[in-house]
Image (cartoon, rainbow, N blue to C red):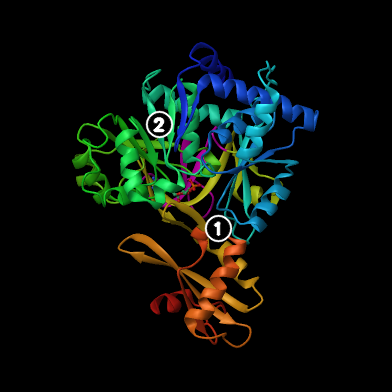
Amino acid sequence: MHLLEQIERHGRTSPDRLAHVSGDRRMTHGELLAKSNALAAWLDSQLGERRTPVAVHGHKEPEMLVAFLAAVKSGRPYVPIDYMTPEARMARVVEIAGAEIVLTPAKVAEIVAAAGALDYQRKPLENSDPFYILFTSGSTGEPKGVVITLANLNHYLEWMHAEGNFQECGEVFLNHAPFTFDLSVHDIYLALSSGNTIFSLTKDHITNLRALFIALRECGATQWMSTPSFAQMCMIEKGFNSEMMSQMRAFYFCGEALAPETASKMIERFPGVTIWNTYGPTEATVAMTKIGITREIIAQWNPLPIGYAMTGTRVVIRGEDGKAVPPGERGEIVIVGPNVSPGYLKRDDLTAKAFYPIDDSRAYRTGDWGRDRDGMIFCEGRMDSQIKLHGYRIELGDLEANLRALPEIADAVVLPVKKGDIIDSLTAFVVLSGVKQGTDFEQAAKLKTQLGVRLPAYMVPRKFHFLDSFPMNNNGKADRKKLAEML
Ligand code: AMP
C-alpha cells in the first residue's frame, strides 16, 4: 500500500470531503493536503537534510494530523506528546527522541498561515523507515519509545482494509483514544487512506457526559475503536444504543480484556453490529488478532478469545525453556511477523530482552500469558507488573521509581485495586524518609501534587498508606501479597 500517496490522492480528488472533526473544528482532505505540504516544506527549511523525529505536543486539534503527515512526508518520524504529559516527562521524551523541533497546534497554524499555498515533493520513504514513535511507561521510571516503521503500519492497514470492508466515502471513524495511544492510529490511517472522516472526542467530551452523548448522537460514526473501559463508561447511559448511534457498522475493542458481560450488553444494545475483540501491544502495531464476538462465543468461553492472528503474522506460545509449548498449554504470547517493531528507541538493552529473530522474521515477547487452541488465541493476563487502568498502560515499576525519587519518600510499592475483575484505581504504600507532614490526607495530597509534576494524572495513585516499614518476603523484598491483604 502506498499510504501517503493514497492519502494525498483523496486530498486532490475529493478536496471538500471532511477529513477531521474535532470539537467545533473541521478540516477537509484538501486542507489537510495543502497544510501538511506547507508544514513539510517548513520542516525542511529548518532541519535541512536532518531526518530527526518531530515532536508534536497537543490534544485532538486538526493541526496534530497536519503535523503528523508533514513530518512523514518530509521523511521524519513523529512523536505525539499528549497535553496531559507533565513538562519534566515531556522534556525527557523530547531528549530521548532527539527531536529538534516541538510543534504545537498554535505553531502549526502560524507556520501554515504564513506559508500560503505551495506544492511539495514528498520525500521517498523506505519500508524500514520509522513512521512514528510512541512512548509508553517503562519499568525503571523512564518512558520508552516504541519505533513503528512504514512496513509495520502498512501490514496492519492492509490487513484491516482486506477484512474491514470499509466503504470509500461515508464512513466516520470515532476517535476516542489520545493520539499517544496507538488505537488512534487505527482511526487516523484507516480513515485518511480510505478518504473518510475521523471524528475525535476531545477532553471536553470526556469530562462532560452530556456533551459526550450529544456528540455520539450527532457524529454519524460508523466505525468505533476503543478500550472496553470506554464502552463500559458509555453504558452508564441507558440511551447508549443503536437508536443513539444508528449508523454504527462495527465496534473494535482492544487494549485490555473484553469482559463477557460487556460484550453481551453491547450485542443487546447494538443488534446486528459486529463486535470485534482485537489484541495487540504497541510493539506489534495496534492489533494483530481479532474475532467477531457472538452470543455462542460468550456462552462457550470465559475469558473470551482474542481470536486469530492477522494474515502474514503468527503467534507462538513460548514455554519457560524458550520453546513452543504443546497446543492448548499456557505460555507467553510471542508475536512473529512484519508488524513487529524494530524495538525501543536508543534502548538496545530493552530491545534485546523483548525482541529476537525467529527464522527470517522479527519476534516480540509480549509478557502476556496465553494459549493457542487450534489457532484461536486466548490472552490470560500479564506475567509482570504492567497493568491497564481505564485503558492506560502503566508499569507499576515506573510509578514506584518516580515515587522513590521524591525526597520525602524512602520506599514505595504500588498495587492495583480491583472492582470485580477490573482494575479500578491504584494504591501506594509508602515509607517516608522523615516525619509525616500533617495528617495522612494532607501528606498524601502533598505527594500527589509532587508526583503530578513528574507523571501524567492518570498514573497518580488514588490512595496512600503510610507504613514504618514494609513486610518482607523470604527474598528480603517487600511482600506484595501481605500488602495486598491490607487493601
Ligand atoms: P498497549 O501497548 O497499550 O496496546 O497494551 C498492550 C497490552 O494490553 C497487551 O500486551 C495486553 O496485556 C493488553 N491487551 C491488549 N488487547 C487485549 C485484549 N483484547 N485482551 C486482553 N488484553 C489485551
In the image shown, does 355 or 157 lie closer to the viewer?
Answer: 157
Kindly report the secondary structure that dominates the magenta region of the rendered protein: loop
Task: Say which residue appears at 67% left-offset and 50% top-offset.
Answer: 93
Which residue type does callout 1 highlight? Pro
Q: Is residue 316 magenta?
A: yes
Amino acid carrying label 2: it is Phe
Is 219 on the left-hand or right-hand side of 1? left
Visible in this render: residue 10? yes
Up the image or down, 419 lies above or below 46; here it is: below
Instruction: Bin the neighbour count of mark 1 within 10 Å (Cα to Cα): few under 14, some 14-19, many 20 and up.
Output: some
SS class of the residue under badge 1? loop
Read off the residue under disc 2. 173
- Residue at x 53% of width, y 82% of height: 470
> What are the residue bounds of the magenta stretch?
313-340
Residue 137 x %, y %: 57, 55
Q: Secondary structure at mark 2?
A: strand
Report the residue at 76% width, 27% height from top. 44
The mark nearer the N terminus, 2 or 1, is: 2
CB at disc 2 and ligand 1 closer than 8 Å:
no
Q: Is residue 382 left or right of residue 451?
A: left
Q: Residue 434's image quarter?
A: bottom right
Quarter the C terminus occupies: bottom left
Residue, far top: 13
Q: Position of residue 422 (x, y in %)?
A: 35, 59
Q: Nearer the viewer, residue 313 or 70?
A: 70
- In the displayed structure, does residue 337 sit left or right of residue 208? right
Disc 1 target residue: 456
